[in-house]
Amino acid sequence: MKVNLDGQVALVTGAGGAIGRAIAKALASNGARVACTDIDADAAREAAADCPGSAALRMDVTDEAEVGHAVDETLRRFGRLDILVNNAGVNTTAHRVTIDQFPTAEWERILRVDLTGIFLVARAGAKAMLARKSGRIINIASVLGIVPARLQSPYIAAKAGVVNLTKAMAIELGSQGILVNCIAPGSILTEATRRLFYDEGGKMHDRVQAHLAHIPLGRPGSCDEIASAALFLAAPESSYVNGAILPVDGGWLAGYIREF
Ligand SMILES: NC(=O)c1ccc[n+]([C@@H]2O[C@H](COP(=O)([O-])OP(=O)(O)OC[C@H]3O[C@@H](n4cnc5c(N)ncnc54)[C@H](O)[C@@H]3O)[C@@H](O)[C@H]2O)c1
């Protein structure tokens, strides 16, 4: 997919991760200069190495001071902010338990990154965009923010929050020239999910096969497929899209694939 982002400046959170890196690369290869930010400074630098004319910045989305500094630094280096991708996110692996067993600290950690982090970065980014009355904010939620699954209640609550926060921001900022939209990825194959999907011999686990049988396309998505959706929402071509929740999920949310 090719769009024209020449002269535009983007900031991507969690750019050192699998999906963030693909999004940063897609934005950069379509002309944007990208501030690749991540709590992991080395990962941010590796992402920036793939993005010509970009910057690598350490930014913890839960730290108000670091968020402010990273947005200011982006403005200082590049002079403007046109596209903000709120991608950083965490889930629980150690605590796949029902709500009655869920530890408070883990609940608070996930809510803090996945929901409060989006608020803090969006607030700082929106202020910069309001000065020019123009911008795009793209929040990365999850299909699980729309249709929950078991044993990951804080992630699901946070992602549902991201879905409605997107709409709240869209109705507040749309009249100011700032379009706010959300992508809800389904199952995406990354290095981390590959380890969950396949055994050491490369055979897919039975439970993953059962899971994929609920997806009409019958396969996980790729990071590039999420990046293409982000590119569309960043591009001049999507100038009338505001407050949309775009599932990129192979049809997961379309309905039940099985017969009743
Ligand atoms: N991979 C999937 O199947 C999938 C599905 C649905 C939604 N998502 C969402 O997509 C986004 C990216 O997921 P991914 O699979 O690329 O994950 P990932 O773990 O590969 O990348 C996440 C990145 O966020 C960074 N990060 C974590 N905490 C941070 C913090 N406090 N401040 C700044 N950066 C922080 C990490 O260092 C990492 O680089 C997340 O919001 C995730 O919830 C992923």
Image (spheres, rainbow, N blue to C red):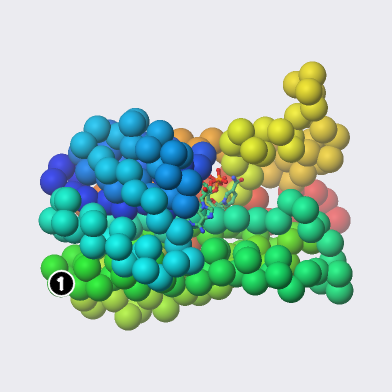
Tell me: residue 93, above or below residue 128: above
Q: Quadrant of the N terminus?
A: top left
Tell me: residue 15, above or below residue 100: above
Seen at 80% across and 27% down, the residue is 199
Q: Quadrant of residue 46?
A: top left
* Left or right: 161, with 182 as reference point: right
Seen at 31% across and 58% down, the residue is 70
Q: Quadrant of residue 146?
A: bottom right
Mark 1 lies on residue: 131
Point out residue 57 in the picture as x, y percentages from the top left corner: 34, 49
- Check disc 1 and report its element: helix, strand or loop: loop
Which one is nearer the viewer's eye here, 249 or 65?
65
Q: Quadrant of residue 69?
A: bottom left
* Left or right: 128, with 192 as reference point: left
Q: Does the numbered disc 1 mark a residue whose Cβ is under 8 Å from ligand 1?
A: no
Label 1 CA crowd tier, 10 Å (few <14, some 14–19, many 20+): few
Question: Can residue 193 be seen from the camera position used here?
Answer: yes
Tell me: residue 41, above or below residue 178: above
Seen at 21% across and 50% down, the residue is 9
Point out residue 153 in the picture as x, y percentages from the top left corner: 73, 67
Which one is nearer the viewer's eye here, 42 or 157?
42
Tell me: residue 19, above or below residue 116: above
Identify the amino acid type marked 1.
Ala
* Left or right: 172, with 245 as reference point: left
